[in-house]
């Protein structure tokens, strides 16, 4: 028994894969036995062939590209702005007081609810999606930047000042590396949220993108297409998350809890 | 010594704002230090020792009084704190190189000098260790090397061995006094150990309870190198007694 447990433990890299395959199998089983029409629950094979069709006619490539573009623009814009403002807020209590009501309010407003407004104002094109994406990314990155910069040990600040370091040197050699762990975990959350932001925008109103494909699929009872779009979104989110996590592991290898 | 003082402190006072008229940490502290002197500052906790060092390092403005560094310019400071204060993302040698990086020195030249200091503090083989893999004593050696590498005019040490165990601490005394003799630095070191101050210092300044004033300025005329056995001599005993009485 103990041996068996140890074996499972040793092969835990495969456990995820096995569990995925079992999930697929279960889905297939349900779609075969439950006797549901395929516009309610298409089988894995139907989804796969719909995927091939969408791949062949170019619609998958185009719409995934559009969504990815919106996500990346939104992520860079939102995270970039949040980093700059977060740094300034961390440095200035006065600025924090000035901005606090807006920041709290922006968190209280459900973004999903104002997405239609943004689409009305800025049109059904990509810009409104990028904006929604940037807004949803903004807050977690901002908060983590503030917390990260405030977590710089004061003793290291003293050290830098005793060495007559310039502001730029303190930023580069102390604040950025010290704040990086907390900042990056904010960015990781932001990366996942950015996918949600783009899709919400597209669902509200768009003529391109994976959200648009979902709308089309729903309207035409082409549920397999909805599945294909959802899987593409999952992959996009996982890839983005993975990239940030990879950067984290590269940049933060000095952290104790990562050495395990 | 007949040389001009490298540092003159005149009527230094430090008051921290608080709710009833300000907290006086230092009051009318005056003293002079000659080049290459090793000064220990002794005093009960809260007597303003750290405050004094922070003022000397330029981290804090005194409420009144003057700090004058011989030639008028700001001195280069090497500082060691109670905790080693290493940057956890830098290896030992990268930590040691920090002051030279801030000076804009060429990387290879900086590395060369850092290697020499690694030798001086006896950390060969640990150049690329991260701080998390260093013992307390080793981390403090890195901190000392970092404080020396840019050839500072003044070395400020704030209870640098306070967090080490007794054995390591005494080994570090010997090390520090060897390094000091090799590098010919002016040192001001805060401590609350009488023994430590007698082991290391040319002069001991004793501060009173808050607000800190200088109560005693004692010259330690024990010949160097100072060995372990010196603490059993009657002269050591007399000096220790004087310091003890001054601290109260
Ligand atoms: N930044 C500060 N703000 C307010 N009070 C302070 C500050 N730094 C030190 N003090 C107070 O000044 C007194 C002297 O502190 P310190 O110089 O750290 O003493 P020591 O190092 O001798 O123990 C203490 O009472 C301390 O609480
Ligand atoms: Mg202190």
Image (tube, grey):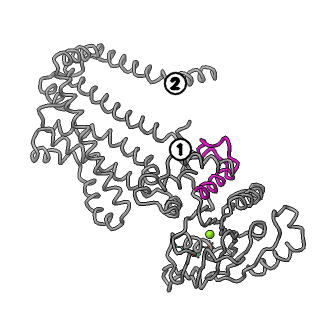
Q: Which quadrant would the N terminus of chain A be assigned to in this image?
A: top right
Residue that label 1 marks: B108
**Which residue shows up at 9% across the image and 45% down it?**
A120
Q: Would you place residue B248 above or below residue A170 in this image?
A: below
Q: Is residue B138 magenta?
A: yes
Q: Which x, y percent locates residue B42? A: 70, 74
Q: Which x, y percent locates residue B116? A: 64, 48
Magenta stretch: give its range: B121-149
Residue that label 2 marks: A12
Q: Is residue B116 left or right of residue A101?
A: right
Q: Is residue B117 magenta?
A: no
**Whole-number angstrom distance, CA of label 1 to CA of label 2:** 45 Å
Q: Secondary structure at mark 1?
A: helix
Q: Which x, y percent locates residue A151? A: 46, 56
Image depth: mark 1 or mark 2 in front: 1
Relative depth, front residue between A105 and B166: B166
**Which residue shows up at 37% across the image and 16% down it?**
A25
**Which residue shows up at 52% across the image and 61% down it?**
A163
């Amino acid at each position: 028994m103990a041996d068996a447990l140890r074996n499972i433990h040793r092969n835990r890299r495969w456990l995820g894969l096995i569990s995925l395959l079992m999930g697929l199998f279960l889905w297939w089983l349900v779609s075969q036995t439950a006797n549901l029409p395929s516009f309610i629950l298409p089988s894995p094979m139907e989804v796969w062939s719909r995927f091939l069709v969408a791949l062949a006619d170019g619609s998958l490539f185009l719409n995934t590209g559009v969504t990815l573009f919106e996500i990346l623009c939104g992520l860079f814009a939102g995270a970039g702005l949040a980093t700059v403002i977060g740094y300034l807020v961390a440095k200035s209590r006065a600025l924090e007081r000035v901005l606090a009501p807006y920041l709290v309010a922006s968190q209280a407003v459900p973004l999903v609810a104002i997405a239609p407004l943004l689409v009305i104002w800025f049109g059904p094109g990509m810009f409104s999606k990028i904006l929604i994406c940037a807004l949803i990314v903004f807050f977690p990155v901002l908060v983590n930047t503030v917390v990260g910069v405030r977590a710089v040990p004061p003793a290291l600040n003293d050290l830098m000042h005793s060495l007559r370091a310039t502001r730029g040197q303190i930023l580069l050699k102390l604040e950025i590396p010290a704040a990086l762990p907390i900042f990056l975990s904010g960015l990781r959350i932001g990366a996942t949220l950015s996918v949600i932001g783009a899709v919400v925008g597209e669902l509200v109103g768009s003529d391109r993108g994976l959200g648009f494909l979902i709308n089309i699929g729903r309207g035409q009872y082409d549920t397999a297409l909805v599945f294909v779009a959802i899987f593409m979104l999952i992959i996009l989110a996982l890839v983005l998350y993975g990239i940030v996590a990879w950067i984290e592991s590269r940049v933060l290898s000095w952290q104790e809890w990562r050495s395990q | 010594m007949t040389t001009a003082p490298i540092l003159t402190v005149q009527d230094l006072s430090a008051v921290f704002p608080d709710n009833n008229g300000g907290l006086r940490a230092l009051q009318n502290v005056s003293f002079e230090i000659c080049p290459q002197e090793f000064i220990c500052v002794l005093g009960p906790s809260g007597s303003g020792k750290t405050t004094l060092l922070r003022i000397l390092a330029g981290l804090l403005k005194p409420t009144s009084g003057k700090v004058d560094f011989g030639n008028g310019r700001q001195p280069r400071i090497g500082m060691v704190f109670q905790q080693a204060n290493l940057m956890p993302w830098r290896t030992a040698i990268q930590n040691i190189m920090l002051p030279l990086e801030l000076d804009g020195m060429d990387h290879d030249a900086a590395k060369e000098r850092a290697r020499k200091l690694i030798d001086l503090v006896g950390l060969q083989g640990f150049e690329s260790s991260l701080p998390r893999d260093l013992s307390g004593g080793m981390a403090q050696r890195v901190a000392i090397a970092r404080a020396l590498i840019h050839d500072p005019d003044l070395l400020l040490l704030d209870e640098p061995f306070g967090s080490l165990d007794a054995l390591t601490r005494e080994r570090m005394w010997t090390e520090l006094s060897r390094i000091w003799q090799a590098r010919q630095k002016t040192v001001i070191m805060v401590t609350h150990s009488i023994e430590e101050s007698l082991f290391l210092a040319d002069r001991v300044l004793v501060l009173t309870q808050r607000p800190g004033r200088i109560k005693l300025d004692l010259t330690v005329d024990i010949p160097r190198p100072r060995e372990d056995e010196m603490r059993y001599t009657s002269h050591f005993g007399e000096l220790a007694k004087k310091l003890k009485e001054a601290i109260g």
